[in-house]
Amino acid sequence: MRRSNMSEPTKQAMTPAERLNQYIAEDRIIRGTWTGRDIMGRETACLLAAFAEGMDSPEKCPATIMPPWLAYLTPSFDDHGSIEKWPNMIRRYGALALKWHRLGDDAWNRCLAKTMIAVLEIARPYDRSRSCELVIELWKREYNGNFVQQSDWEEAAHAAWAAARSAEVARAAARSAKAAEGAAAWAPRAAAWAAAWAARSAAAAWDEITNACLDAIEDEISKSQAETAMDEATE
């Protein structure tokens, strides 16, 4: 029998989002640690680590997969929400990850703004300094595409840090908020996380924050799909 000179077609590698969804489908997503093995000896990973081998910190997540701020928040989405809502949350997160590559910088910035507004709304009833209201207004301006002066962020930072200084989780909150660039920009956000954690049970607060973030991403994806369909219809 004559052998063909044609090589076998190579199997196309999975995208990071496809790899994540395979882990989700096979019940290999874990909480509380980056990676491990289950009782069958299979590799397991947290919601962020499942995107790619060797991803054991948010700093290692390429911006081609997701924006840095979402990489920093994803481990908290995975670890700190209620266990009852966790299975549906990771499936929803995985489904959105397959589609969010179509989002541009402006869309991602709106997602961040919506997420932070949700955090601040959680914290506002417990904020005696009224600094949350100040930062909410700044985020609304960001969401609407209006430039926020550096001095405005700095003023909000001083007020917000003063309000959150006594929160036990301020350090963890600051790590989550580290995704934003520039101390003046992320300081108010860190304070917001601290206030949210201090004000309510962690699980309930993180369920709301996670839902707000995923709602924002889903909304931007829907807008992008509608715009694409409209463009195709006019061609």
Image (cartoon, rainbow, N blue to C red):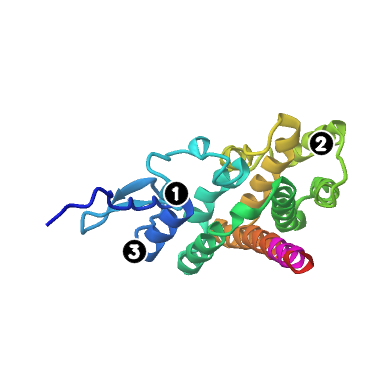
- Please state the horizontal and vertical placement of residue 104, each as a whole percent of the image: 69, 49
Q: Is residue 92 left or right of residue 44?
A: right
Eyeballing the image, is 42 above or below 86?
Answer: above
The residue located at (73%, 55%) in the rendering is 114
| Disc 2 target residue | 153
Question: Residue 161, can we see it?
Answer: no
What's under tag 1, amino acid-wise?
Phe
Quarter the N terminus occupies? bottom left
Residue 226 shown in magenta: yes
| Disc 1 target residue | 51
Residue in the foreground of this view, choosing between 95 and 39: 95
Question: Residue 100, can we see it?
Answer: yes
Q: Are marks 3 and 1 in contact (CB under 8 Å)?
A: no
The alpha-carbon separation of the residues under discs 1 and 2 comes to: 33 Å
Eyeballing the image, is 2 above or below 92?
Answer: above
Outermost left residue? 1
Residue 75 shown in magenta: no
> Which SS class for mark 2?
helix
| Circle 2 residues within 10 Å: few <14, some 14–19, many ≥20 | many
> Which SS class for mark 3?
loop
The residues colored magenta run: 223-231
What's under tag 2, amino acid-wise?
Trp
Residue in the foreground of this view, choosing between 148 and 122: 148
The residue located at (77%, 36%) in the rendering is 157
The alpha-carbon separation of the residues under discs 3 and 2 comes to: 44 Å
| Disc 3 target residue | 26
- Please state the horizontal and vertical placement of residue 112, each as a whole percent of the image: 70, 49
The residue located at (28%, 52%) in the rendering is 8
What's under tag 3, amino acid-wise?
Glu
